[in-house]
Amino acid sequence: MIFEFITYAFLLSFFVAVFEIIIEKDKGWGTAFKKNKWYANKFFIPIHKLTGTYPLLNYHFVMFFIIYPLFLWGVVSYLEIDAALYAVAMYPLLLIVEDFLWFVLNPYFPSLRNFFRGPKGNIWWHRKWKKIGHVYVPTSYIVSMVLSALILLYIYVVS
């Protein structure tokens, strides 16, 4: 069941990444959109400060707090996974996979090469980076992975 869940989550991430590539092209983080209509309110300031990204767009609000949770709830219900915490643990990973796929699949933006250059590249919307070995990783990826790992650890300790 977990393999099916991960497969569905990857597929959703793939289609969302393709959708974002279509609407954004080479303009990452919605920079082609009108800021007065697309940028979310100040409620999300703690999120972007913690993760080291720029302020969230209304698009992100819809995806992060409506579309993804509905998807996860639907998959958990369909697969009859007893522990809904698996869905909660997978949620941050889903966001990482979608974001990374945007860099991998985007033909309009030389993004994968710039991604691994971290702060030396031109991916300005990830403000904070950590060097791991010879490559850089956005701090938001690390925060998300740690959060998922802690939730999974809690699931295994409790059960």
Image (tube, grey):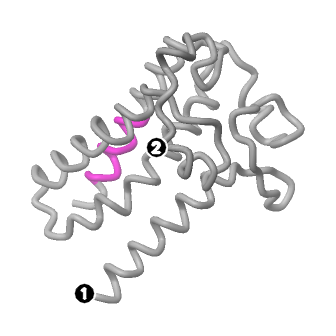
Q: Would you say the magenta stretch is mainly helix, strand or loop?
A: helix
Q: Nearer the viewer, mark 2 or mark 1?
A: 2
Measured as percent of width and height from the top left, residue 111 is found at: 72, 27
**Position of 33 relative to 82 (above/below):** above
How many C-alpha atoms fall within 10 Å of the one at disc 2: few (<14), some, or many (≥20)? Answer: few
Q: Nearer the viewer, residue 61 or 119?
A: 61
- Give the x, y percent position of residue 108: 67, 13
- Displayed quadrant of residue 154: bottom left
Mark earlier in primary sequence (2, 1): 2
Decide whether residue 9 is among the magenta residues: yes
How many discs appear?
Answer: 2
In this picture, is 66 found above or below 136?
A: above
Which residue is at 34% across, 52% downward?
6
| Amino acid under disc 1 | Ser
Hey, which quadrant is residue 100 in on the image? top right
Residue 90: x, y in percent?
Answer: 38, 57
Extent of the magenta region: 4-13
- Does residue 15 show up magenta in the picture? no
- Element type at mark 1: loop
Left or right, residue 51 beside residue 83? right
In the picture of the structure, the residue carrying the numbered disc 2 is 43
Figure quadrant of the C terminus: bottom left
